[in-house]
């Protein structure tokens, strides 16, 4: 079992971690964590996914701001997980990607991050009443 780190929901990185947020294909970072990423972590308006500055966007919505299919989001998260394994010296602060404006639940999204390393995850992804359902 891996050592999983959780951070309090709604907090921000304090130690230079890469800020990981839910984005849209068009890169319109206008609300929530995406806006925070654009204002304070180097996300680039018009670039919807990947590493920019000290942020990493994971697409959860299409270019019309409609939620992506859960299987498409899974592919986007798998790409992120691969990125973490290829960049082992980075540390990542993962927000509740897909669980806000995209409308998916913690139970649907959190397990998709199984292959990620060097990450801190939202506390909401650790279920104290029924056991952890987040990355193990």
Image (cartoon, rainbow, N blue to C red):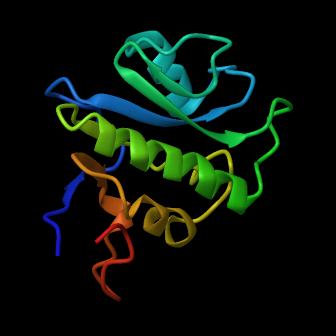
Q: Residue at x 48, y 36 (%)?
A: 21
Q: Residue at x 27, y 80 (%)?
A: 128
Q: Residue at x 28, y 38 (%)?
A: 92
Q: Nearer the viewer, residue 39 or 2?
A: 2
Q: Quadrant of residue 129?
A: bottom left
Q: Quick check: can you spot residue 134?
A: yes
Q: Nearer the viewer, residue 101 or 74?
A: 74
Residue 123's spot in the image, x, y percent?
30, 59
Q: Quadrant of the N terminus?
A: bottom left
Residue 86's spot in the image, x, y percent?
31, 38
How many labels sit on residues? 0
Horizontal side of residue 112 vs 119, given as left or right: right
Q: Quadrant of the C terminus?
A: bottom left
Extreme right residue here? 64
Q: Quick check: can you spot residue 95?
A: no
Horizontal side of residue 6 vs 75, given as left or right: left
Q: Residue at x 26, y 51 (%)?
A: 117
Extreme front residue here? 86
Q: Quadrant of residue 65?
A: top right
Judge whether 107 appears above or below 28 on screen: below
Q: Quadrant of residue 13?
A: top left
Residue 8's spot in the image, x, y percent?
26, 50
Q: Nearer the viewer, residue 41 or 52?
A: 52
Judge whether 33 appears above or below 129 on screen: above
């Amino acid at each position: 079992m891996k050592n999983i780190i959780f951070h309090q929901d709604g907090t921000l990185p304090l130690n230079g971690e890469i800020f990981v947020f839910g984005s849209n294909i068009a890169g319109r970072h206008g609300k929530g964590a995406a806006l925070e990423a654009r204002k304070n972590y180097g996300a680039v308006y018009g670039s919807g996914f990947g590493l920019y500055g000290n942020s990493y966007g994971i697409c959860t919505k299409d270019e019309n701001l409609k939620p992506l299919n859960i299987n498409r989001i899974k592919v986007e998260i798998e790409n992120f997980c691969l990125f973490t394994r290829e960049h082992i010296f980075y540390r990542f602060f993962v927000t509740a990607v897909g669980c806000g404006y995209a409308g998916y639940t913690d139970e649907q999204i959190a397990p998709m991050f199984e292959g990620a390393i060097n990450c801190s995850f939202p506390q909401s992804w650790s279920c104290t009443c029924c056991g952890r359902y987040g990355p193990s």
